[in-house]
Each structure stands twice: as structure tokens, then as C-alpha cells.
Amino acid sequence: MCSKVLLISTNRCATPDAVFPIGLSHLNAALRRAGHETRWFDCNVDDQPLSEVLTDFRPHFAGVSIRNIDDVLIRKRETYYGHLSEVCATVRQSHPCPIVLGGSGFSIFPRQLFELTGADFGIQGEGETGFLTLVAALTQGTEVSHIPGLVYRCGDSIVANPQHCLTVAEPLDGPDRPVHLVDHYLKRSGMLNVQTQRGCAHTCCYCTYPLIEGRVHRRRPPEVVAEEMAQLEAGGARYAFIVDSVFNSSPQHVAETCEALIRRQLRLRWGCFLRPKDLTPELMELMAHAGLSHIEFGTDSFCDAVLAAYDKRFTFDDIQRSSELARQRQIDQCHFLICGGPGETLETLETGFKNSQRLNGAVIMACVGMRIYPGTALFQRALAEGRIAAEADLLTPVYYLAPGLTGEKVFAQIERFARLSPNWIVGDPTPGYVRLVERLRARGVAGPLWSYFSMVQRLWSSTSEVVNA
């Protein structure tokens, strides 16, 4: 039986760039192929009040997506779930129908967000199979308690079924990216996004990707990825970002995907997250030939002792080799650092800074403190060290700093690094950075802007106007 489903993206974060809700695209594709009618409401885009959309569309179900919990910035600590209860209340008041929560943020805190919003159901992890099974069961009046990943009430208790992460993302077509949303995100950033695989088998101590997508890699056919990139280019995108946890989970996957892109002869530039290990000159050359222009390395530290404590399973030598390969191919590169986590000291920070000077042409994006999420190795460590209680409310951001460190000490150290080396960008986005982003976007610049910001810092010896404005 065909149902009408309203898909609601609750993400309101637009700094430094608003991000197209690709997860809803894949859910939309699954619903559409099953014969259901869908409509979208994006809190970042739509001007029409949600109450009017509900009255006009009269959905049988409302799927509410929670993308991010907070900004992961220790000084600011901005959260993004405060309006969820209001969204759910609007659904109940304007057109009562079952409310189903989902999205990556919900998958990390399913019980807390379920209780907070008073929703009817939730789906942890990948939503396509679970959501469709739930819709079918509710429509037919059959039992729902067996559905993998389902969150529901049983008497006074909240039950969260184990996830079953075996889904390969649905192929997308035009209807899965509503035109008015595409126009908005292209206007804001000139770029859209694509996913080539799901799952993450790596063991970074803080990371939630395995909790959300599982530890088994499910790779999409290269020709499907290339077709979606071609759709983005045809729709006006000049840049695409691959949202995989790490694109280079498999050299074969990278090679086959890039070869498919090359066969399509696309002009679309793209960027991705890469793990700075096991990259070769041949693979970097192939990615560059396929359109790779920006690499965001999930590096986390430039000190081997800290890398080991973070369970990164690579060394600074791996980082340096990877960085040099990118430099040789003239691909812009950025290394993200988490300063102050397990094993960190002021001495390891100093070692990391000295090592960073050996990375020619790399931008360093450094943040302070490691966000603690339930279900991670960091959570267990913080619990064992008495930093948190087992029942701690981690929905409100809590950060880990290694013994002997404070946020002030770490900020003072890395801000000194930034004064010594203009390729270091530290802490929260400043008003100066936000203004730079706005000017560059107004001029039609697409893609990540950290390379421009670093360039501005290098051009002016005094960076106080840009950094501190």
C-alpha cells in the first residue's frame, strides 16, 4: 500500500557551509522505489512553515532526521537538537501521524533523543530497510518489535533493538534531490555530496562511524557512483565531496571508482576524507586524474606516541609520505588534529608541531579536547579513569583532556604554533573566517575554503585581523 511520507531534515548548522542532507536522499530513493510518495522539509532551507506543509501534504508518516548533535568545539559547545521537540510538537498539532526519528545523530543517542522528543518510533543506523519495514508493518497492523534498529516503547521502558548494518546505499535519481534544495546548497557552497561506501573497520578510540554504519565495508558499484557524480555535474554542481568515513578503505575500491569517473569524462572536481596510510604514487595519480582536488586527512596527531594512544594504527612517517604524495600532485591537503586526547602532553604537542614543519604545503586544522560519545573506546577509558559516570548525560557535550592538561594550556600551546606557522588554523571559526567564507562564496568559489584561509594568513605577516576579528 502506498503511503505519504514527509521527510524532515532538522539540521540548521550552516557554518562554514550548509551541507546537503544526503542521508535523506537515500531514504527517499528506497521509499520511492517501494511505491511511496515523499515530500521534504528542510529546516535550513524552507520558508513555508512546517505546519502548512503538514496541512497541505497530509502525510501518513513523518521521518525526522537528526544529523549532528553539536559542533564538537570545546569552547563554544553549541548543540543542534534543541528544536527537535518543537518539530515533533508541530507534527502532532498540525497533522498527527507516527513520528519516526533517524539520522546519524539519533543513532548515537537513540534513547535520550527518543525520550526528549516523545516520538513514536526511531531507527538506529541505516534507515532504508528499517523504515520501510516499519511503514509496512504499521500500515498492515502487524508486529513491529522484531525490526532491527527499531527504537520503541514497551510499557514504561524504551527498547532499542540491535542494528543490522548490511545495506548498500540506494542509487539516486533526480527526484531524490529536490530541486529547490539543490539550488539552495549550490548557491551557498557550489557543491553537493556523494557516498561511495558504508561502514568503517578502523578503530579510532573516539569515533562513532562504526556505531552508526557498522564495521563492515559495503562498497557501491563504481558505475553507480560515477552516474551520481554525472548527475551532480549536470545539475550545476562544480564540486562534490565524498562523505565516506575514509575513501581509501580499499585501494581496489579507490582505483575502480576513479576509473569509472575517468570513463565518464567529468569536469567535476571533488574532495574526500583519506587515511594517511598505504597510499601510493600510482593511486594518488589516478585520483588526481579523476578530479580529486582536496584531501582532508583524518590525521589527529603528528606524534607517534599519541597516534598509538588514539589507536590510529599509522605513524608520522606514514603521514609524511601521504602528504608528500598529495603535494607532488598539487592537491590541496588539510590535516585535522585533535589536541589533548589520551597520551597527550605539552611535550607531545611540541613534537607534533616540529613534525608539522616537515609537511610542505599542508594546512593544519587543530581543535582541542576529544568529544566523548557512548559506545566508544574513549568512553570506556573515561569511565575507567573516573572522568565520567556510567549514567553520564553525554548528550550535553563532554570532552576528554589527558591528565595534567587543561583546555587553556592546550589552546595556549597551539595558538603559539599558529603564530609561528600560518598554515595552522586553531579552534572555533572566527568572525573573520566566516566573513572570508561569505566573500569567497559570493564570488562563486566552490569547495573547501581552508586552503584560501591559509593563503590569506601567509600573504599577510600580521594575521590578527583575520584570526581574531
Image (spheres, rainbow, N blue to C red):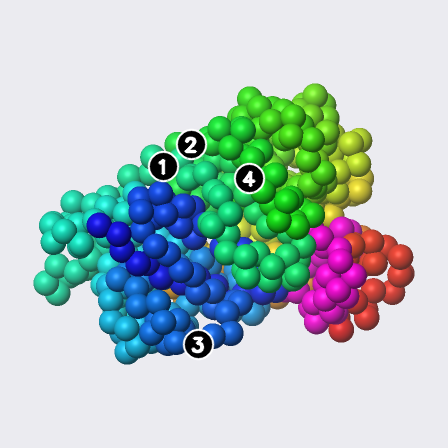
Q: Position of residue 466 (x, y in %)?
A: 79, 67
Q: Along the polypeptide, which appears first: circle 2 or circle 1? A: 1
Q: Which residue occupies 75% across, 58% down?
A: 444
Q: Is residue 299 visible?
A: no
Please name the residue that numbered disc 2 is placed on: 218
Please name the residue that numbered disc 1 is placed on: 167
Residue range of the region highlighted in magenta in the rendering:
422-451
Which sits in the foreground, 165 or 24? 24
Residue 438 magenta-highlighted: yes
The CA span between labels 1 and 3 is 34 Å
Q: Which residue occupies 75% across, 55% down?
A: 445
Q: Along the polypeptide, which appears first: circle 4 or circle 3? A: 3
Tell me, yes or no, whether the two marked residues, 2 and 1, touch with CB atoms within 8 Å. yes
Please name the residue that numbered disc 4 is placed on: 228
Amino acid residing under circle 1: Thr
Tell me, yes or no, whether the two marked residues, 2 and 4, touch with CB atoms within 8 Å. no
- Callout 2 environment at 10 Å: few (<14), some (14 to 19), or many (20+)? some
Amino acid residing under circle 2: Arg
